[in-house]
Amino acid sequence: MKTDTIFYQLFQSFPSIFFELIQLPISEANNYRFDSVEVKQLSFRLDGVFLPQNNHPQTPIYFCEVQFQEDEAFYQRFFTEIFLYLSKTDLTNDWRGVIVYPNPQVETDKVQRYRELLNSERVRRIYLNELENIPQTSIGLATVQLITLSKAKAIDSTRKLIQRVRQELTPDQKPQELLQLIETILVYKLPLLNRREIETMFSLDELKQTQYFQDVREEARQEGRQEGIEQGIEQGIEQGRLNKALEAVPRLLALGLSVEQVASALELEVKQVRAIQNGT
């Protein structure tokens, strides 16, 4: 799973995290819906857009891009898509751009044409490594921080974060959904983490709701189905062998072999041979 996909899932389910990142009140999330917008005339789509609810004209549109790889043409593409969208939409709202970087080193230095925009209030650049300098973070920011933590710190931080989610979030704050996203981040960061390590972090009920559990269960079903097929084949072969052996019993008895000799030769039980001998 790509990093931007994880972020977009976070913003879709918990839009308040986005507004925390740009240091606005989390209540702002109530005024927006996170969406993908398509410019049909030009056949392209913007995936990370916060659109004002009810098209409130005084509320700016936020264009969000998650950029975890260096790309010299990034700003060219970013601003081109924004202005193309603005030229085609019926909305008259002001706009803001937000770029999420893991650190400043990933950002391209090809900024000459866009310097005025980047230095204005229209564009906000977020460097996630700077979150590590914040001593006390909200659950939302701690979840984002988990994405950029080193692998050495990730497991311990995940355990602490899961505990906070259990203790601090009420049911209406969707703790189970956040736990699923935390599990997604953990598996994304540490794909070689074994099942036992993941399972120790979640309770059974929580684990049952995660994609990880669904994948493991489906894997077990597939293995069980395959085993069933293999067992069925083996049983079919065995049944075929048995039928052939039973068909041979009358011929061997007719040759004068004893019941015991026939049973031994065909690997049958004596009672099976007697039953055929007696016509039962």
Image: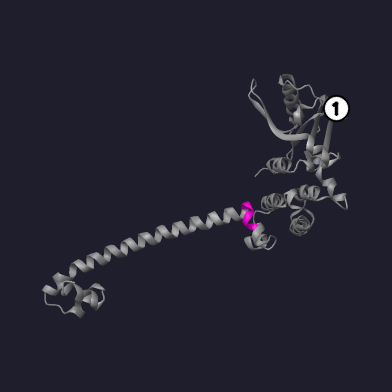
The residue located at (76%, 55%) in the rendering is 165
Mark yes or no: residue 193 visible.
no
Tag 1 secondary structure: helix
Q: Is residue 238 left or right of residue 59?
A: left
Q: Amino acid at mark 1?
A: Arg
Q: Is residue 268 left or right of residue 153?
A: left
Circle 1 residue: 115
Which percent across, then down, holds residue 57?
81, 25
Tell me the crowding category of disc 1: few under 14, some 14 to 19, or many 20 or more residues within 10 angstroms, Cα based.
few
The residue located at (45%, 57%) in the rendering is 225
Q: Is residue 30 left or right of residue 9?
A: right
Task: Say whether residue 267 is magenta.
Answer: no
Q: Which residues are magenta?
A: 207-211
Which percent across, then down, holds residue 115?
85, 27
Specify the quadrant of the image occupied by residue 75: top right
Q: Is residue 238 above or below residue 253?
A: above
The quarter of the rendered structure image containing the C terminus is: bottom left
Give the dominant element type of the magenta stretch: helix, strand or loop: helix
